[in-house]
Amino acid sequence: MVQALRSKSISHLLEKPVIYRWSGRFAAQDAKWCHMERQLVDYELIVMEKGTLFIEDEWGQYEISEGEYILMAPTKLQKGTKPSKCRFYWMHFWLPEGMDGLEECFPKQGQLQHPERLYVLFKQLMDFDLRYMDPLGSGYFATTILCELQNQLQESDEETDKTAAKESLSARVDEYLVRHMAETISVGALAREFGYHEKYFSALFKRETGRSVKQYVDERKLDRAKYLLLNTDAWVAEIAEHLGFGEVQNFYHQFKKATNCTPSEYRELYRKKQDTHL
């Protein structure tokens, strides 16, 4: 579960980007892998993609599972506590001179609402760093990842506050999308699913999320499409069918409108097969 957010915002804390060191996507070859033991000299953000990472530092032991993150501060001891076959994105960075209080911006560990967005940002950062070797630009990318992380946590906190007595509509829609992602989803179908009149459901959803139902559904489908483009070998037409876009040209049109490039161009731009290490 996500812990309650601290009061400080990272956007107010930063006058310049963090200092990027390196990043990567790590995949354990088998279930015998265990995180190395070392002194961690900088900050490390880990975002889990698959499995569970068992790790500790001088302040405690942690289990980070799929869709969760951990942000570890410099420490005298960082080591794995149990072997596991897992996969995760990682990023090391320093804070610019005069900046402190990062720990006040984030719970150390938590659940992400939309981990696919962070997976995509990590891919873009790794591609940018490999392509241009521009420390300042990579620092801005790294800072963008931290801002996305905090905004997701903030969004989660706000939803928790609003739905203490009742689960939010957007969360229920998310659960529905997981089961019906391959279908063409109409506002009317969603309203009937949750027992509302269509117009009332649309107004209620817009008040809760600030977006129309169609915008929200399209965003979720496009988030999933980006993930599939970067992490599978599926044909674009297969992804379009899997996500219920109907004609592949409709998928191309919506994707290009949202990203300013076609699905194939997006895959070519950001999908880089590269060896990475901790």
Image (spheres, rainbow, N blue to C red):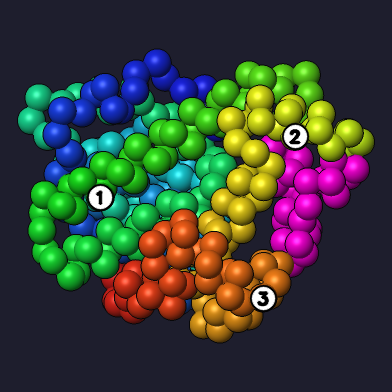
132 in the magenta segment: no
Q: Which residue is mark 3?
A: 247
Q: Amino acid at mark 2?
A: Ser
Q: Amino acid at mark 1?
A: Phe
Q: Is 182 displayed left or right of 224 in the figure? A: right
Q: Which residue is mark 2?
A: 202
As helix, strand or loop, the secondary structure at mark 3 comes to loop
18 relative to 123, above or below: above
| Contact? badges 1 and 3 (CB < 8 Å) | no
Q: Name the residue located 9 percent from the left edge and 24 percent from the top edge.
A: 98
**As rendered, which of 185 and 137 lies closer to the eye?**
185
Q: Which residue is mark 1?
A: 141
Q: Quadrant of residue 25?
A: bottom left
**As rendered, which of 184 and 107 lies closer to the eye?**
184
Q: Which SS does the magenta portion mostly show?
A: helix
Q: Quadrant of the C terminus?
A: bottom left
| Residue, far left | 97
Which comes before the other along the chain, label 1 or label 3? 1
Which segment is the magenta one? 170-193
